[in-house]
Image (cartoon, coloured by chain):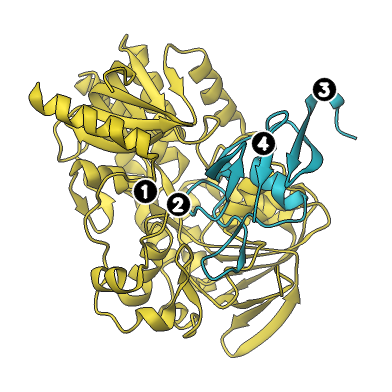
Chain colours: A cyan, B yellow
């Protein structure tokens, strides 16, 4: 079990999740079993580059669209949304 | 808009990988006021990305950065250079103007991705991409992973993933064994690098194939298996993750926006890392893919040169010359096999942002025509992925760079307009 002091609680599409500190939002979405976005022809997509270049990891965070989730660490109470 | 926050520094360094860290610490050590700006949440760049125990050298440099007077601005994305001696960055919803005496570009490199059927499926990552995700907390223990593409990074990635408990099913490098062996022979003068490679090989303990690459990735909503091809032989491996990258391509967008001369895809510099633009220097991968050692030396040279310590910089430049053979050796050993151009089929997506497939692109003569007619390269990645792929597939070269070099908020762009107007009046 992860150390509770270093556990971050957030929600992904309304589902409560806990992850270890230093986990990126992109990883939280993948752990939650989802993908990060639907492409313009509605294919499921997930991160490719892992370093903020490819923009496949775009999600909504706290109501803000187009957030590159692989470059952002999970924070307590974050509300993450994907299609 | 007059309240756009603005900061002034003697030296601004863009990119907090090894080259940028070395440049910033060196310049600050000479008493200058230095900012180190970076898109990532932590210093180290991609090669020293946080998330696992870093090598001793990386820890030493990152600790030195913390102990220095350098103003580190993480999570800040530089998107414009509206006037000489000023760059604009965005952090969250904030825009900031950074005015500089000298600018050092240490923007690093990204992986080159080549399209093949199924490469858009979730759980197909870059090689460095999966490594970065694992460092960002993605559990890989017990997962079956195929590592493919080309370059020395593949072994390093396989070893990292294996150390985290992944089952490495296969490592496939498109380069022929002979060329890699010849390159390793050249490295006999650098036994450290050879031992490192051997150590990775031992840790990963996977079957390694040369002249081999992924022909197709399969799965319904996510990756389930990958077909690997080697000469006429093809076979399919069930796997959870595919980590596939075809070596590195430099990040030169900002250098091109500023107007630095580019030759053969790389930023041209003199021995003291000076670009063709007066107060702009460049260090590390954008000047030639060479890895950490050269990046550190070039960073130090640029840091010294930026503060006018030319003699010290020249002495270091002598040392740099001794290891430049590694750059050309690397390029030759891992040159891409032209056969890889035939991986994409008519319906394979090349531009992932706009879902433009290979069949739609092959009708055009140049990048510009393809872009205007198909929207290829017009999505948020601004051609960073498909542009490099199209260069290999069709021999097209991207046209000029225009601001913003990264997508930015409209409110931020309004700030940019203000700065550029203000600067031209001054």
Residue located beneath label 3 in the image: A5
In the rendered image, is residue B318 in sight? no
Q: Earlier in the sequence, mark 1 or mark 2?
A: 2
Q: Chain of mark 3?
A: A
- Provide the secondary structure element on which disc 3 rests: helix
Which of discs 3 and 1 lies nearer the camera? The answer is 3
Do tag 4 and tag 2 residues touch (Cβ < 8 Å)? no
CB atoms at circles 1 and 2 under 8 Å apart?
yes
| Nearer to me, A7 or B156 | A7
Q: Secondary structure at mark 4?
A: loop
Q: Quadrant of the C terminus of chain B?
A: top left
- Residue B79 point in image, percent of width and height: 34, 39
Label 2, on which residue?
B110
Neighbor class of circle 3 (other Cα within 10 Å; few <14, some 14-19, many 20+) is few
Could you say which quadrant of the image residue B58 lies in? top right
Q: Which residue is mark 1?
A: B251
Q: Residue at x 24, y 49 (%)?
A: B402
The answer to whether tags 3 and 1 share a subunit is no
Judged from this view, the residue extending furthest toward the right is A1
The chain that hosts pointer 2 is: B
Residue A49 in sight here: yes
The circle on residue B51 is: 4
* Figure disc tally: 4
In this orientation, which residue lies closer to the viewer: B197 or A48? A48
Q: CA distance from mark 4 to mark 1?
A: 23 Å
Q: Please report contact status of discs 4 and 1: CB closer than 8 Å, yes or no.
A: no
x then y, percent, for residue B297: 37, 33
The subunit carrying tag 4 is B
Numbered label attached to residue B387: none
**Residue at 21% across, 35% down:** B82
Against B300, is B374 above or below?
A: below
């Amino acid at each position: 079990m992860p150390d509770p002091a270093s556990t971050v609680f957030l929600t992904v599409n309304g589902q409560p999740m806990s992850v270890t500190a230093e986990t990126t939002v992109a990883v939280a979405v993948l752990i939650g079993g989802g993908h990060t976005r639907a492409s313009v022809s509605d294919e499921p997509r997930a991160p490719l580059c892992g370093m903020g270049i490819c923009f496949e990891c775009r999600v909504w965070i706290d109501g803000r669209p187009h957030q590159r989730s692989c470059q952002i660490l999970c924070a307590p109470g974050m509300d993450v949304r994907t299609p | 808009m007059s309240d756009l926050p603005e900061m002034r520094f003697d030296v601004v360094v863009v990119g907090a990988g090894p080259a940028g860290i070395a440049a910033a610490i060196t310049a600050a050590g000479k008493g200058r006021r230095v900012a180190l700006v970076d898109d990532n949440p932590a210093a180290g760049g991609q090669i020293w990305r946080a998330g696992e125990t870093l090598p001793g050298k990386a820890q030493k440099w990152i600790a030195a950065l913390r102990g220095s007077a350098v103003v580190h601005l993480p999570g800040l994305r530089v998107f414009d250079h509206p006037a000489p001696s000023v760059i604009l960055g965005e952090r969250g919803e904030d825009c900031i103007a950074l005015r500089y005496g000298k600018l050092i570009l240490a923007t690093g490199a990204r992986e080159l991705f080549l399209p093949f059927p199924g490469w858009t499926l979730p759980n197909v990552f870059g090689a460095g991409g999966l490594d970065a995700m694992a460092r960002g907390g993605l559990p890989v223990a017990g997962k079956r992973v195929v590592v493919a593409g080309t370059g020395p990074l593949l072994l390093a990635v396989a070893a990292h993933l294996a150390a985290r408990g992944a089952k490495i099913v296969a490592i496939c490098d498109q380069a022929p064994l002979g060329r890699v062996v010849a390159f390793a022979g050249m490295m006999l003068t650098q036994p450290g690098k050879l031992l490192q490679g051997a150590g990775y090989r031992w840790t990963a303990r996977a079957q390694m194939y040369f002249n081999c690459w992924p022909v197709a990735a399969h799965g319904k909503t996510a990756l389930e298996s990958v077909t690997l091809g080697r000469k006429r032989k093809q076979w399919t491996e069930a796997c959870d993750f595919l980590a596939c990258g075809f070596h590195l391509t430099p990040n030169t967008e900002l250098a091109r926006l500023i107007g630095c001369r580019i030759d053969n895809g790389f930023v041209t510099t003199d021995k003291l890392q000076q670009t063709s633009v007066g107060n702009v220097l460049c260090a590390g991968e954008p000047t030639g893919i060479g890895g950490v050692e050269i990046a550190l030396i070039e960073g130090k040279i640029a840091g010294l040169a930026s503060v006018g310590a030319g003699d010290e910089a020249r002495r270091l430049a002598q040392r740099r010359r001794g290891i430049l053979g590694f750059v050309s050796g690397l390029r030759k050993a891992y040159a891409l096999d032209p056969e890889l151009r035939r991986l994409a089929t008519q319906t394979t997506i090349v531009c992932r942002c706009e879902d433009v497939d290979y069949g739609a692109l092959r009708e055009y003569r140049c990048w510009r025509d393809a872009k205007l007619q198909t929207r290829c390269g017009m999505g948020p990645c601004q051609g960073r992925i498909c542009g490099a792929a199209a260069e290999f597939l069709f021999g097209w070269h991207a046209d000029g760079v225009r601001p913003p070099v990264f997508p930015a908020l409209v409110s931020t762009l309004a700030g940019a307009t203000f700065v550029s107007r203000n600067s031209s009046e001054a």
